[in-house]
C-alpha cells in the first residue's frame, strides 16, 4: 500500500502539472481539493482518466469521485479494492 | 474630445528572446524545449501563479505577454483583441494524438479545455480580473487594418479605456507574439502603419 501511495503522489504531480510541489509535500491524509493541494474540477476529471488509464478502473458515476479523491489514503484504498485482477 | 489613440507599451516574444518596447529583457541561453523556455520566462517575472503550469503553450505565451504589459496597470477596463493564424492548432494536435488510437483512447480533460484560442484571453482576464470586451480573430497574417478599426472603435465609442491587442501565434513550437497596450496616452500614435512597423521590428 505504501508503494501505491508513493506512486499516486508522483503520478498526480506529473499528470496535473503541479510544478512547485514535491512528493514529500503531500501527506497521505491531506485533502486533495480545497485547502489541501488546491486541485480544481478539471483536475478531478484528469484523476478519473488517470484511474482508468493507469489502473483500469472506470468510475461510472462522477459523483463517486468526491469520496474517492478525498486524499491519497482514500484513493489508494479504492484502487486496492477495485483494481481488476 | 481627443480621439487620438496612442501605443503605451509593446512586447515581442520570439523563440528565444523577449523584447519590451524594442529592448531585450530576456534571452534563452539554453537550447531546450518550448515548455522549459516559457517556464524560464515565467521564473524571470518573479511571480507566483501555479496555474501557469497547467496552461497549454498558447495560453502561456498569451499570459506572459500580458504579464509584461499589464503588471504595473491598475486599470481593469482593458479590452483584449488578439489574432493569429494557427488558432489553437498546437494543442488541437495533442488532443487528436490522445484520441487517434481507439484501443488507447484517453483524451485528457486538461488538454481538451485549451482547444480554443480565446481560452488564452480567459486566462489573462482571470489573472488581471478583467471583465471587459474581448475578441479573437483568425487570419492568414497579422491584419493591422482590422485590428486598428476594431480597437479604435472600442476606444472612441468608450466601450473600454485601453486595449491589449496583438498577434499571438504558436505552431509546432514556432512562437510569434507581438502584443501592445493602447489608450489615450502613450509613446507613439496608434496607426496601422506604426503598428505594422513595430511588429516587423
Image: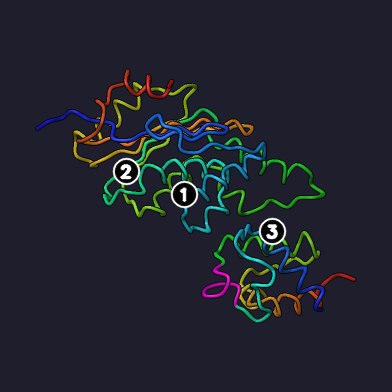
Residue at the image point whose x is 35% and y is 27% from the top:
B147
The C terminus of chain B sits in image quarter: top left
B147 up-or-down from A36: above or below: above
Helix, strand or loop at disc 3?
helix
Depth check, front residue: B107 or B125: B125
x%, y% of residue A54?
79, 61
Give the distance between the C-alpha atoms of the residues marked 3 and 2, in whole angstroms: 36 Å
Q: Can you identify the residue that label 2 sits on?
A: B133
Q: Nearer the viewer, mark 3 or mark 2?
A: 3
Q: Are marks 3 and 2 in contact (CB under 8 Å)?
A: no
Nearest the eye: B29 or A41: B29
| Secondary structure category for the residue under label 2 | loop
The chief SS type of the magenta part is: loop
User: Whole-percent x and y of residue B4?
Assistant: 18, 28
Same subunit: marks 3 and 1: no
Tag 1, which chain?
Answer: B
Which circle's residue, 1 or 2, is located before the other in the chain?
1
Q: Which mark is residue B45?
A: 1
- Dot 1 crowding, Cα within 10 Å, few <14, some 14–19, many 20+: few
Residue mark closest to the camera, 1 vs 2: 1
Task: Give the magenta part as a residue range.
Answer: A31-38
Q: Which residue is mark 3?
A: A14
At 55% from the left and 64% from the top, the residue drawn is A41
Query: The residue tagged with tag 1: helix, strand or loop?
Result: loop
In the picture as drawn, the residue positioned furthest to the right comes out as A85
Q: Give residue B2's position: percent from left, percent from top.
A: 12, 31
Q: How many C-alpha atoms fall within 10 Å of the one at disc 3: few (<14), some, or many (≥20)?
A: few
Amino acid at each position: 500500500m505504501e508503494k501505491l501511495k508513493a506512486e499516486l503522489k508522483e503520478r498526480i504531480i506529473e499528470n496535473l502539472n503541479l510544478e512547485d510541489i514535491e512528493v514529500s509535500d503531500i501527506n497521505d491524509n491531506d485533502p486533495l481539493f480545497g485547502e489541501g493541494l488546491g486541485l480544481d474540477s478539471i483536475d478531478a476529471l484528469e484523476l478519473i482518466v488517470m484511474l482508468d488509464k493507469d489502473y483500469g478502473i472506470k468510475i461510472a458515476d462522477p459523483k463517486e469521485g468526491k469520496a474517492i479523491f478525498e486524499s491519497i489514503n482514500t484513493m489508494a484504498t479504492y484502487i486496492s479494492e477495485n483494481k481488476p485482477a | 474630445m481627443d480621439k487620438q489613440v496612442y501605443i503605451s507599451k509593446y512586447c515581442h516574444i520570439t523563440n528565444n528572446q523577449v523584447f519590451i518596447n524594442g529592448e531585450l529583457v530576456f534571452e534563452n541561453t539554453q537550447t531546450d524545449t518550448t515548455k522549459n523556455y516559457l517556464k524560464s520566462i515565467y521564473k524571470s517575472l518573479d511571480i507566483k501563479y501555479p496555474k501557469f503550469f497547467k496552461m497549454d503553450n498558447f495560453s502561456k505565451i498569451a499570459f506572459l505577454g500580458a504579464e509584461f504589459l499589464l503588471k504595473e496597470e491598475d486599470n481593469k477596463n482593458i479590452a483584449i483583441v488578439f489574432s493569429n493564424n494557427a488558432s489553437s492548432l498546437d494543442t488541437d494536435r495533442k488532443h487528436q494524438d490522445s484520441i487517434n488510437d481507439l484501443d488507447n483512447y484517453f483524451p485528457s480533460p486538461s488538454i481538451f479545455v485549451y482547444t480554443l484560442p480565446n481560452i488564452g484571453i480567459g486566462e489573462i482576464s482571470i489573472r488581471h480580473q478583467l471583465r471587459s470586451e474581448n475578441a479573437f480573430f483568425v487570419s492568414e497574417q497579422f491584419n493591422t487594418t482590422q485590428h486598428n478599426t476594431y480597437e479604435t472603435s472600442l476606444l472612441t465609442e468608450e466601450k473600454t479605456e485601453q486595449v491589449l491587442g496583438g498577434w499571438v501565434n504558436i505552431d509546432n513550437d514556432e512562437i510569434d507574439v507581438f502584443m501592445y497596450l493602447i489608450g489615450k496616452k502613450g509613446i507613439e500614435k496608434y496607426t496601422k502603419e506604426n503598428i505594422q512597423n513595430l511588429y516587423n521590428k
